[in-house]
Amino acid sequence: MDYRDLPREELIRQYSPRIAVPEHPVWKAQWTLASALARSRYEGRMRVPYGPTPGQTLDLFPAKAPGAPINIFVHGGFWRFLDSFDHTLVAPAVLDAGGASILLNYDLCPKVPLTEVVRQVRAALKWVWDHAEEANGDREKIYISGHSAGGHLASMMCTGDFNRDFGLPDDAVKGATIVSAMLDLDPVMLVPGAEELLVPDDEVRALSPRYNPPAPHIPLVVAVGGMETTEWIRQTEDMMVVLRERGSPAVYLKPEFDQHYSILLSLGNPLSELCCAMLRQMGLPAMDPYVFGDVVW
């Protein structure tokens, strides 16, 4: 099936980062090494359960002092792969700036449908609200971030009236950093592997932040790599149009030399513009972004 006049082969390339970035194993190896180094240098509690199933765990790295802002990070992997341990590299920048970092896991599709993944991440948010002091954090300063499919899940934490269903206030999330996210699932459902998400046709748009955007009172940092595919960039820029029409105070960043995998390293680099924007959103001190020639990283 064509989508936006894209032949099926090109559609698959556009929405398959492992095809668009053939050297992706090299980048993922860097994620693994940087994440292992972070876990060796920072004390935390790993695999803390927030729900009854094996996938419902989180890694908790407490702040240096009580009352700190908390960053909840949601990992990507097409909702079907990867783990919080692949992404610990995002924690040090938050910890060094004085915040707390919590990285989520969830049961992967097709073990559960995508609707259940969304519910689990909401349950994790409730756990963090109830246990913020265990992270030396302030539950009135909870921020969420996510990359790729995790960016989709982070976006879903900022939309709708789910907070009331979980006994949370409407403003439980004080801000979000959404990185290289899948925001419109219509084309995603045409890519091989999407059948494992177990999403009925009539639920696709209900699970798409493009059609259920974050509440306009929540400050957002929305980013996509300048070297990502044109469709990935288009999705993000279309989302920005929706957000601005709703009056959202969203900041849009497009790091010129980042693709889908390298941008995660930028999120964890306190000298990057992206990481600085996330830290400032949380009220944490941030460095001036590193400038290389005419490019601000």
Image: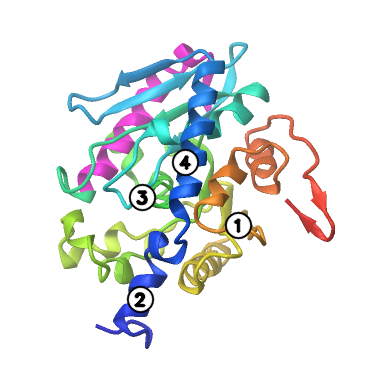
Q: CA distance from mark 3 to mark 1?
A: 31 Å
Give the residue type at disc 3: Gly
Q: In the rendered image of this protein, does residue 205 appear above or below residue 221?
A: below
Q: In the rendered image of this protein, does residue 295 appear above or below residue 245?
A: above
Number of callouts in the render? 4
Judged from the image, the secondary structure of the residue bearing numbered disc 4 is helix
Check disc 1: other Cα within 10 Å, few if <14, some if 14-19, many if 20+.
Answer: some
Stretch of the chain drawn in magenta: 115-142
Check disc 3: other Cα within 10 Å, few if <14, some if 14-19, many if 20+.
Answer: few
List x then y, in percent, for residue 126: 35, 28
Sequence order check, earlier mark of 3 and 1: 3
Sequence order check, earlier mark of 3 and 2: 2
List x then y, in percent, for residue 270: 69, 36
Sequence order check, earlier mark of 3 and 4: 4
Q: Which residue is mark 3?
A: 160
Give the residue type at disc 1: Asp
Residue 123 visible within the image: yes
Sequence order check, earlier mark of 1 and 4: 4
Front position in the image: 138 or 54: 54
Q: Which residue is mark 4?
A: 29
Evaluate if marks 3 and 4 touch, with contact meaning CB atoms under 8 Å apart.
Answer: no
